[in-house]
Structures are given as structure tokens and as C-alpha cells.
Amino acid sequence: MLSILTKLRPMRVVLLSLAILSLIFKAKIGTPVSYDGWPMIETVFIPVMSPLIIMVLLLDSLISTIWFTQTTGEEKNRYKLILSCNLVMIIVMLSLWIPFFIALLL
């Protein structure tokens, strides 16, 4: 596990941690919005930040793909790991957040 975290480097570990935290603290569909206190984090801040986190994951995937095509050997394997972690997290986040945002529109 430590080897994987070392290969991902600190910025990507923080980004993936933020993505996981946004999934943990995601409000249930139909929860009334609260504009004060700690519930505001769950009902306002996290839903606003989650699309931004997804966009940063997509941007990191794009940059990793560019570096993946230009490297060889162990670095190529490292970027393959980064790409797979990013893409799995993007798929998980989209599958869990899209129903929430669709419910907001209806």
C-alpha cells in the first residue's frame, strides 16, 4: 500500500482522498438544504466541490496520458497506475453523484 501511495505522489493522494471524502459525506437524495452550521458542508459545500474534483481528476488523467505516451519502463508503469486510479475514481464518482444532480433538476 505504501508503495502505491509513493508512486502516486502526495498531490494525487490528496486529490483521491478528497474524492473519497466527497463520497463519504454525500447527502442523501431529498435532504433539505441547510445554509448554516455543519450541515451546510454536507448539503452545499460537498455537492459544489464534487464536480470540480471530477474535472481535476479528468485533467490529471489527460496530463498522465500525455506523460504515459512519452515515457518508458518503470515511469510508464507509474503513469498506468495513476491513470487507472483516476479513471476508477471518476467512474465511481459519476455513478454516485449523477442521481443526486438529476434529483435536483426534477
Image (cartoon, rainbow, N blue to C red):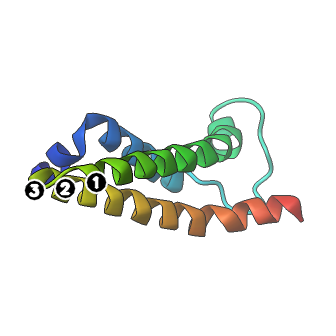
Q: Are marks 3 and 2 in contact (CB under 8 Å)?
A: yes
Residue 40 is situated, as x and y percent measured from the top left of the image, at: 69, 36
Q: Residue at x 62, y 34 (%)?
A: 38
Residue 75 placement, left or right of 91? left
Secondary element under disc 1, as helix, strand or loop, is helix
Q: Residue at x 77, y 39 (%)?
A: 34
CB under 8 Å between discs 1 and 2: yes
Disc 1 and disc 3 in contact, CB within 8 angstroms: no
Q: Is residue 88 above or below residue 27?
A: below
Cα distance in 3D space between marks 1 and 2: 5 Å
Sort mark 1 into few (<14), some (14-19) or many (20+) by Cα contacts within 10 Å. some
Picture quarter containing residue 39? top right
Disc 1 residue type (three-letter): Phe
Which residue, given by chain and number where applicable, does mark 1 sit on? 68
Q: Residue at x 57, y 47 (%)?
A: 55
Badge 3 crowding class, 10 Å Cα cut-off, few under 14, some 14 to 19, many 20 or more, is few
Mark 3 secondary-structure assignment: loop
Kindly identify the residue that appears in the image at 25 percent across and 59 percent down. Answer: 81
Establish if 98 lies above or below 79: below
Name which quarter of the figure residue 96 lies in. Answer: bottom right
Would you say 30 lies left or right of 53 here? Answer: right
Q: Does 97 sit left or right of 29 as displayed?
A: left
Q: Which residue is mark 2?
A: 76
**Circle 3 residue:** 73
Relative image position of residue 43 (x, y in whole percent): 70, 45
Image quadrant in which the C terminus is located: bottom right
Measured in 3D between alpha carbons, the distance from the residue under mark 1 to the one under mark 3, in whole angstroms, is 10 Å
